[in-house]
Image (spheres, rainbow, N blue to C red):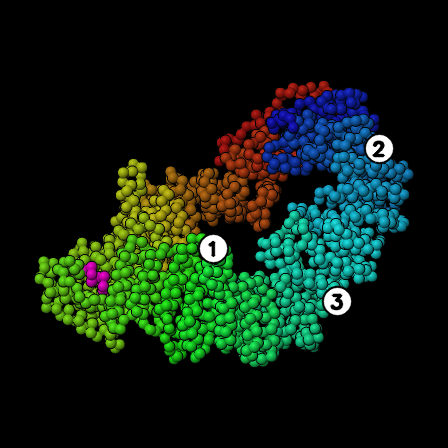
């Protein structure tokens, strides 16, 4: 844009010799030739292009300015001249401000100039013309200049709007426009706006100036044409009559216009034609075009049509077509008809472009068709045959609405589509039948886009041309029928949408309607699996070879959604379709290809049934009337199997159940009634899919529910004929389901259940054969379903089933040689044999499982005795092995079930079957071909379950078989944990197997004990293994039932009785009776051995008599333990009592030290018993423990508590710890617990410990203990007072580790306190209540201490303390205090901490007034502590507690004394808080201390610390509410003076409170101090006004409140009502300026004597440190000067303010100041008469008188005035 001039230089540029708009003589200017113009030398038109124009430089003071000060009757006073010069200079500065960098300044200057322009448009135009020298290259915002000039031109009246004057302005604008080749810059557009404004006054002049550039080639020609286009759009009524002149000048140069300029010309023609249409619409007569204009228009039309539309430039073609679209109605019909062969192809060609171009071309084509076909002037200009090319071209483009490839252009593309459809509609209105036939013919074409476009167009036009197309209904239906099998996705989408439209207008009925519905159903059946399988889609939905190239899965998904929605619309919203849909939709449920749409079809049927059930004709009547419909049995069979997947898309299962209820009349009556009860239950089970997914067995459960539902339905029907018919329906539906799908398996089971209800053996045998033929034994799910189905049949037809299975086995068998050869040849053949054997085995197994128990013994013995199952041992695939093992397991379960029913019989060859299972469970040598690791684990798990079943069957296992089983299975304990679900199941099955072996082994207890010992010996390596998963798999805990009774007698020391007793003591409380007995026997044996040994040194403290008595008690216990009447708890207590006596002190210590494993025993009852035993030991013998023993015991118990996760067991351990603390040295226990807590806090994330943090539970236990609660609370408070806060200063870096340890102890103490307060219950709460003052004081002091640490960034301790503090609030029931801490507790600023402590103290005082005295006594002593933070916290609390000491005068006096003593503390915070406390004295006692308090406040108002000063001001506000006149009056003026000094503080809080306090003192300004008080108010008023719009909100609010309080005392009439207006309370800048204007108007009218002082103060604020205050001062001063009428006051300040505004303020670095200065200058100029012209004619200025202004470096008048301005006495540079 070129070099730009700074603003201060621009202001000086306004004073250099300027181009004058005046004529060359003093007489009124004569009308001159348009080219007779005086221009400056820099003007572009002064060169050879316009050599006839003259150039001159005029004086700097133009005639526009001369009219201000020089008129025939004006007074030539110096003041008037100075004012005029200042006003002129202000306008110049405003014009220069248009180039400011800040947008708000430019906007303010622009607004001010627009306000000033109506006063003297000529002056504004003169200044703008002057600043425009050099154009945009020297002035940055030429756009603003031209906009101001445009406003001034519009404001000109008829006398001032002289043609010569407007011509000169037009020259400036045109000169700027032609300075650049481009026309897209804002300053050029603004120049065009100026020319349009000139044209509104004198269109001929403006157009004449523009026509100057039409005489020859010039780069400005496009810009001038654009101006004419803008003028035509803005002033259509003035432009249209002059169109002939425009065309006269434009036509000659059209032939030489280059392609780059042609779009501008075309756009101009478009705008001119639009203006002509507006003129026609507004004028009462016709178009005012003569023959010449029409000839010109025809010529332009021909040029655009024949030449420009053929350009290679797309922009040219597009703009030409757009112009032609507007011109077609303005040319003659003959010419239009002859042009149609050219114009239509041009438009159609552009319609094929992108969306932006196509929309414009389509709009023009729409206009053309409207004029050509729907004109009232004559018949259509185009026959339908001539429109074929239009239709052929547009139809493919109309397919957009169905295309998903243009998602980025949906908005514009939809507009284009609508325009195209408007074109079709215009043609259809003239040629409806022809268009219909054409569209139908295109539907038969091979072009996909044309077909899609035609279908979309028919959909769009059918509702609009319904009557005209009624005769073509049959043809349209036939076309739709022919397209139903089309492969194109776009065609299918269009058809789906068209079908709904046709149906809604009754175009579909009968067979075609059924085909359309089938079409929608077919595409609704696309499943999610289909979308992921292109082969399925290509084969079943799209047979087109181009499928892979054209298909879009997203498009298919959309097609499915459209078809589903269309089906529902047909069923719900179109009543006429009911006859088509019912019962036709029932037929669509059956075919396999429509399976995916069954949910949608069921929804539609449900809606139809809801409607039809309200009609007179029942459903079954219409159903039976249709012979092509499926039978009810067939429907039921289909829908029942489709229920299989409860999570299918579209809530398939729910929809099927719903539609079954509605179709109830089609079925036997009893069945319908049964369904009404059962269907809601089934729907409830699957109502929440997400909840259903949480159950891993949901599918199995749901299938069983379906089967039970079906079985009960058959029982309800009790009609053999209907059941057989239903069976036939099931049999015919096998082809509807894939064999790999669960639906086929469910179908097997359903058919098996049905055959169970049939008595016809021939029918049953036939259907069994059918089931086998339609099954796939190679697929596990189908194989299992078949086996279960066959088993269900066996429940009623066992012999028939066995006969069938025997035939299958005989036909499927192979010789060993054939099998061997097939193995070496084809692995697949081996697997086929495996599948057959697996299926047969399962069928035998389920047949035995479901068969009646009364008849299965012989069959099972025959099956096992013939070794038929031995043939299945050679299967190799894991799934086949699992099937064979499952079959053996089912045989065993059948025997067990028979035994449970009283039909017991042994299973022959049971051991051989076990061998079969163990053989199938192992890994074969050939398994390395495929990795069957997971399958192998599953096989082994199934095998263990089968072994358990076989072991549980008579006869008992022989020793050899038992050892074989154990050897093969015990190794599973070493399995890794992953995959967890399989391994966990396997281990569980193994443990169950071991239990079964123990239960069935041996004849007496001794043999069982030997067996158990054998198992334990086998488990020993796993029990002691270092691998965690092997230890977790230990099943030995269940096997401690029989131990041998003989032991070698060792010495007592080697027995390690403490550890051994602790190991076996948990078993004495085991859940198994045998285990308890053996454990007691072992313990008795140990002590028996120990007592038989010689007396050892370690046993000196043993009393033998008591020991033998205790041993005898143990022996007695063993003899009675099996009695049912014996209380086992009492037995265990007797055992523990005996053991307590038998143990020596050292053994007791060892036992307590090793108690961790026992207390964490996996058997909960055993663990609890161990803990109870430890408690008994501690209570009875705790006095024997030393401090070291107590410490180690505490550590062991704490380790147990940490290990345990069960809440009850952990609580028992906590009771033991509490017992230890109660019966021993509690300080040792507390210290150890606190140490462990601190260590855990430092090393662990205690919030994520599984089962919770055990130490916290220990704290809870202490707090709930009757004896320990008070002790522990005192201990915690002692630690809190004792533990210092480590600051980790850099100078003490060597103590960091020690400080960290201290912090951990402190944090643990805080956590302990929190736990005590949270979990203490009634006991803990009672202890807290008793120590309330101590706890609260400690928390408050520590809160202050830790806040000082938080300020350094260490917040952990503070957070912990706050949690404890809130727990304290909950404990004592102080909800309000808890809310306070939750809201503000974590604030780290000191002020927030002070507020928090005060609010806490307030809450405590309100809640517990009786505790104030002891609490204050503790806190008063804390004021003398060394730690500053604690002194601050104590002072904060006391400053609040003092409010609640009204009933304690002695306490109040003590607190006041303490606070007064510490008001000189070295901590500013303490000083502030002491002062706060003093002003909180209860109101009833305040008068006693008021003088003392006010004296402290007055002193602290001058404190060196600003925060203390702020506190003093705030406290003054508080005290003034209760102070009497006598107390305040002596110091009133002193307070006002000090507050005035604080009002200019940079601290916003200080300013706001100082203003608020100033307002609060208003009530004391009476009496002897009234006059002095009034003077102080008026001295402060300007500052108060300026800060009403302070940057800070609090200052603004305080000033408003103070203003309202002081207003009654200011003695200004109407001021209070002014303050009640809304704008006084608003924060918008505009509202504040409105208030200033109204306020200054009042002040200048009612208090003119004080305006002088107001102005002085406001002018001083020009130097305020806040830019916003400077801006406010500018606004205030300008408003006062604008409303002040007294020239005596105005004269001294007007020039000074103008000088400052023009000088310093307009050059301020702050935009808000510059913007305010601009507005102020505009206001002063507008409110004064400086710019008001006194003559309506131009006056010539003597050039000789202007020579004094020729110096470019001469100072401006404002600069002289600013230099000579003398500031008032006592004024400072800043605001005072």
Residue 62 visible in the current orientation: yes
| Residue contact between numbered discs 3 and 1, judged by CB atoms under 8 Å | no
| Residue contact between numbered discs 3 and 2, judged by CB atoms under 8 Å | no
Instruction: Say whether residue 1138 is left or right of residue 1601.
Output: left
Q: Which of labels 2 and 1 is toward the front?
A: 1
Residue under pointer 1: 824
Q: Is residue 364 above or below residue 1729?
A: below
**Residue 684, position as x, y percentages in the image:** 52, 69
What range is drawn magenta here? 1058-1067
In which quadrant is the N terminus drawn? top right
Q: Is residue 228 above or below residue 836?
A: above
Q: Which of labels 3 and 1 is toward the front?
A: 1
Residue at 32% in and 47% down? 1345
Which comes before the other along the chain, label 2 or label 1? 2
**Residue 1357, position as x, y percentages in the image:** 34, 48
Residue 53 visible in the current orientation: no
Instruction: Say whether residue 1128 is left or right of residue 139.
Output: left
Residue at 56% in and 48% down? 1625
């Amino acid at each position: 844009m070129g070099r730009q001039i700074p603003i201060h230089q621009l202001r000086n540029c306004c004073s250099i010799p300027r181009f004058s708009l005046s004529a060359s003589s003093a007489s009124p200017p004569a009308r001159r030739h348009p080219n007779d113009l005086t221009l400056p030398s820099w003007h572009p038109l002064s060169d050879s292009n316009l050599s006839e124009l003259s150039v001159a430089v005029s004086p700097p003071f133009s005639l526009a300015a001369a009219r201000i000060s020089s008129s025939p009757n004006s007074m030539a006073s110096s003041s008037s001249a100075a004012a005029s010069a200042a006003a002129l200079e202000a306008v110049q500065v405003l014009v220069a401000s248009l180039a400011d960098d800040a947008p708000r300044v430019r906007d303010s200057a622009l607004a001010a100039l627009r306000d000033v322009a109506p006063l003297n448009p000529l002056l504004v135009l003169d200044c703008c013309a002057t600043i425009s020298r050099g154009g945009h290259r020297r002035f940055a915002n030429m756009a603003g200049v031209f906009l101001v000039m445009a406003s001034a031109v519009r404001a000109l009246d008829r006398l001032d709007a002289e043609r010569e004057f407007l011509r000169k302005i037009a020259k400036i604008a045109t000169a700027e426009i032609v300075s650049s080749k481009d026309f897209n810059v804002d300053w050029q557009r603004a120049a065009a706006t100026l020319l349009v404004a000139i044209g509104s006054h004198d269109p001929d002049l403006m157009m004449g100036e523009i026509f100057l550039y039409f005489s020859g080639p010039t780069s400005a020609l496009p810009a001038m044409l654009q101006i004419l286009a803008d003028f035509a759009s803005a002033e259509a009524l003035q432009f249209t009559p002059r169109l002939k002149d425009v065309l006269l000048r434009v036509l000659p140069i059209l032939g030489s216009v280059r392609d780059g300029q042609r779009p501008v010309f075309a756009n101009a023609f478009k705008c001119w034609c639009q203006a002509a249409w507006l003129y026609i619409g507004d004028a009462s007569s016709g178009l005012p075009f003569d023959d010449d204009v029409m000839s010109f228009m025809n010529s332009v039309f021909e040029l655009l049509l024949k030449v420009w539309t053929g350009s290679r430039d797309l922009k040219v073609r597009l703009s030409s077509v757009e112009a032609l679209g507007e011109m077609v109605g303005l040319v003659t019909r003959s010419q239009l008809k002859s042009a149609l062969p050219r114009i239509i192809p041009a438009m159609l060609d552009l319609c094929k472009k992108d969306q932006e171009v196509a929309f414009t071309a389509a709009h023009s084509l729409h206009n053309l068709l409207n004029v050509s076909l729907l004109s009232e002037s004559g018949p259509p200009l185009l026959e339908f045959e001539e429109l074929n090319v239009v239709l052929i071209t547009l139809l493919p483009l109309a397919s957009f609405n169905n295309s998903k490839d243009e998602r980025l252009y949906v908005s514009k593309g939809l507009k284009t589509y609508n325009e195209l459809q408007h074109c079709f509609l215009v043609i259809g209105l003239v040629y409806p039948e022809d268009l219909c036939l054409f569209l139908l013919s295109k539907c038969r074409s091979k072009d996909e886009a044309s077909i899609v476009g035609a279908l979309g167009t028919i959909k769009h036009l059918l509702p609009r041309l319904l009557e005209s197309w009624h005769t073509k209904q049959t043809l349209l239906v036939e076309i739709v029928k022919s397209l139903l099998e089309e492969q194109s996705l776009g065609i299918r989408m269009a058809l789906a949408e068209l079908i709904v439209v046709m149906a809604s207008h009754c175009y579909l009925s009968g067979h075609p309607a059924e085909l359309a519905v089938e079409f929608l159903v077919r595409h609704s059946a696309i499943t999610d699996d289909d979308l992921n399988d292109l082969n399925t889609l290509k084969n079943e939905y799209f047979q087109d070879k181009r499928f892979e190239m054209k298909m879009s899965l997203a498009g298919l998904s959309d097609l499915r959604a459209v078809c589903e929605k269309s089906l529902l619309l047909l069923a719900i919203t179109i009543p006429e379709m009911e006859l088509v849909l019912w019962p036709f939709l029932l037929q669509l449920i059956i075919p396999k290809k429509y399976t995916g749409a069954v949910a949608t079809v069921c929804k539609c049927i449900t809606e139809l049934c809801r409607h039809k059930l309200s009609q007179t004709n029942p459903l079954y009547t219409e159903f039976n009337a249709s012979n092509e419909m499926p039978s009810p049995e067939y429907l039921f069979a289909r829908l029942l199997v489709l229920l299989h997947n409860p999570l299918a898309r579209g809530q398939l299962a729910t929809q099927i159940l719903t539609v079954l209820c509605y179709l109830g009349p089609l079925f036997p009556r009893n069945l319908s009634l049964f369904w009404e009860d059962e269907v809601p239950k089934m729907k409830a089970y699957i109502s929440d899919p997400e909840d259903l997914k949480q159950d891993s067995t949901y599918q199995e459960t749901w299938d069983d529910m379906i089967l039970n539902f079906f079985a009960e339905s058959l029982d309800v029907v009790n009609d053999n004929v209907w059941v057989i018919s239903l069976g036939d329906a099931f049999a015919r539906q096998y082809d509807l389901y894939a064999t790999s799908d669960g639906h086929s398996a469910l179908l097997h089971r359903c058919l098996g259940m049905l055959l169970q209800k049939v008595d016809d053996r021939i029918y049953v045998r036939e259907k069994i054969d059918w089931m086998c033929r339609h099954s796939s034994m190679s697929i596990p799910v189908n194989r299992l379903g078949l086996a279960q189905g066959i088993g269900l049949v066996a429940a009623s037809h066992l012999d028939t089933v066995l006969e069938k299975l025997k035939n299958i086995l005989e036909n499927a068998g192979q010789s060993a040689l054939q099998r061997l050869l097939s193995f070496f040849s084809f692995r697949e053949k081996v697997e086929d044999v495996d599948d057959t054997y697996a299926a047969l085995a399962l069928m035998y197994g389920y047949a035995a499982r479901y068969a009646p128990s009364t008849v299965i013994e012989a069959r099972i013995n025959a099956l096992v005795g013939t070794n038929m199952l031995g043939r299945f041992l050679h299967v190799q695939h894991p799934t086949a092995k699992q099937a064979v093992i499952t079959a053996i397991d089912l045989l065993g379960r059948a025997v067990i079930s028979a035994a449970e029913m009283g039909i017991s019989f042994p299973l022959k060859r049971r051991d051989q079957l076990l061998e079969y299972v163990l053989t199938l469970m192992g890994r074969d040598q050939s398994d390395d071909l495929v990795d069957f690791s997971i399958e192998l684990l599953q096989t082994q798990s199934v095998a263990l379950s089968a072994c358990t079943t076989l072991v549980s069957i008579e006869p008992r296992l022989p020793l050899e078989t038992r050892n074989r089983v154990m050897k093969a299975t015990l190794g599973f304990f070493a399995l890794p944990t992953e995959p967890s679900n399989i391994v966990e199941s396997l281990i569980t099955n193994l443990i169950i197997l071991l239990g079964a072996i123990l239960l069935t082994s041996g004849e007496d207890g001794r043999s069982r004990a030997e067996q158990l010992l054998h198992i334990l010996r086998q488990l020993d390596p796993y029990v002691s293994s270092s691998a965690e998963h092997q230890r977790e798999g230990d099943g030995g805990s269940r096997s401690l039932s029989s131990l041998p009774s003989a032991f070698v007698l060792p010495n007592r020391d080697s027995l390690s009785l403490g550890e051994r007793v602790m190991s076996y003591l948990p078993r004495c409380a085991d859940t198994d009776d045998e285990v308890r007995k053996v454990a007691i026997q072992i313990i008795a044996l140990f002590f028996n051995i120990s007592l038989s040994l010689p007396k050892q040194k370690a046993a000196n403290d043993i009393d033998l008599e008591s020991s033998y008595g205790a041993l005898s008690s143990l022996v007695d216990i063993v003899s009675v333990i099996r009695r049912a009447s014996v209380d086992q708890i009492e037995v265990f207590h007797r055992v523990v009592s005996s053991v307590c006596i038998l143990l020596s002190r050292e053994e007791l210590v060892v036992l307590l030290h090793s108690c961790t494993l026992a207390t964490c025993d996996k058997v909960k009852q055993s663990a609890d018993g161990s803990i109870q035993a430890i408690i008994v030991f501690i209570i009875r013998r705790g006095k024997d423990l030393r401090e070291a023993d107590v410490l180690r015991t505490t550590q062991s118990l704490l380790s147990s508590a940490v290990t345990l996760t069960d809440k009850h067991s952990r609580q028992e351990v906590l009771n033991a710890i509490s017992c230890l603390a109660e019966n021993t040295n509690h300080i040792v226990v507390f210290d150890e617990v606190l140490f462990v807590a601190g260590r855990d806090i430092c090393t662990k994330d205690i919030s994520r410990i599984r089962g919770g943090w055990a130490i916290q539970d220990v704290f809870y236990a202490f707090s709930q203990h009757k004896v320990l609660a008070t002790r522990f609370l005192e201990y915690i408070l002692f630690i809190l007072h004792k533990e210092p806060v480590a600051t980790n200063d850099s100078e003490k870096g060597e103590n960091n580790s020690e400080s960290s340890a201290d912090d951990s102890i402190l944090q643990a103490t805080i956590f302990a306190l929190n736990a005590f307060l949270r979990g203490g219950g009634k006991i803990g709460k009672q202890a807290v209540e008793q120590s309330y003052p101590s706890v609260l004081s400690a928390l408050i002091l520590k809160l202050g201490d830790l806040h000082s640490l938080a300020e350094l960034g260490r917040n952990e301790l503070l957070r912990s303390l706050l949690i404890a503090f809130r727990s304290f609030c909950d404990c004592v029931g102080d909800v309000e205090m808890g809310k306070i801490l939750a809201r503000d507790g974590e604030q780290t600023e000191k002020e927030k901490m002070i507020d928090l402590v005060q609010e806490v103290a307030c809450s405590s005082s309100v809640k517990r007034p009786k505790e104030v005295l002891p609490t204050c006594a503790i806190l008063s002593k804390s004021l003398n502590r060394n730690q500053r933070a604690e002194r601050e916290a104590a002072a904060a609390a006391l400053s609040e507690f003092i409010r609640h000491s009204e009933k304690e005068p002695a306490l109040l006096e003590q607190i006041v004394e303490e606070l007064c003593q510490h008001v000189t503390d070295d901590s500013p915070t303490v000083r502030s808080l002491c002062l706060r406390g003093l002003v909180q004295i209860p109101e009833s006692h305040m008068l006693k201390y008021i003088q003392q308090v006010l004296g402290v406040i007055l002193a602290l108002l001058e404190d060196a610390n600003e925060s203390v000063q702020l506190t003093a001001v705030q406290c003054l506000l508080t005290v003034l509410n209760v102070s009497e006149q006598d107390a305040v009056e002596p110091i009133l003026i002193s307070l006002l003076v000090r507050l005035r000094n604080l009002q200019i503080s940079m601290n916003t809080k200080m300013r706001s409170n100082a203003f608020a306090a100033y307002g609060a003192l208003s009530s004391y300004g009476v009496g002897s101090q009234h006059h002095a008080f009034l003077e102080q108010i008026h001295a402060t008023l300007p500052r108060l006004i300026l800060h009403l719009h302070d940057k800070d909100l609090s200052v603004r609010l305080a000033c408003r409140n103070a203003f309202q309080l002081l207003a009654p005392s200011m003695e200004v009439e109407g001021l209070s009502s002014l303050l009640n207006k809304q704008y006084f309370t608003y924060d918008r800048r505009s509202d504040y300026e409105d208030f200033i204007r109204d306020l200054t108007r009042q002040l200048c009218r009612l208090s003119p004597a004080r305006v002088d002082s107001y102005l002085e103060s406001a002018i001083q604020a020009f130097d305020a440190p806040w830019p916003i205050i400077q801006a406010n001062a500018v606004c205030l001063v300008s408003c006062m000067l604008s409303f002040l009428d007294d020239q005596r006051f105005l004269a001294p300040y007007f020039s000074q303010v103008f000088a400052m505004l023009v000088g310093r303020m307009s050059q301020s670095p702050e935009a808000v100041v510059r913007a305010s200065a601009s507005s102020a200058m505009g206001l002063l100029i507008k409110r004064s008469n400086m710019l008001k012209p006194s003559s309506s004619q131009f006056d010539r200025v003597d050039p000789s008188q202007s020579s004094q202004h020729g110096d470019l470096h001469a100072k401006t008048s404002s600069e002289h005035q600013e230099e000579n301005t003398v500031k008032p006495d006592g004024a400072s540079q800043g605001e005072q």
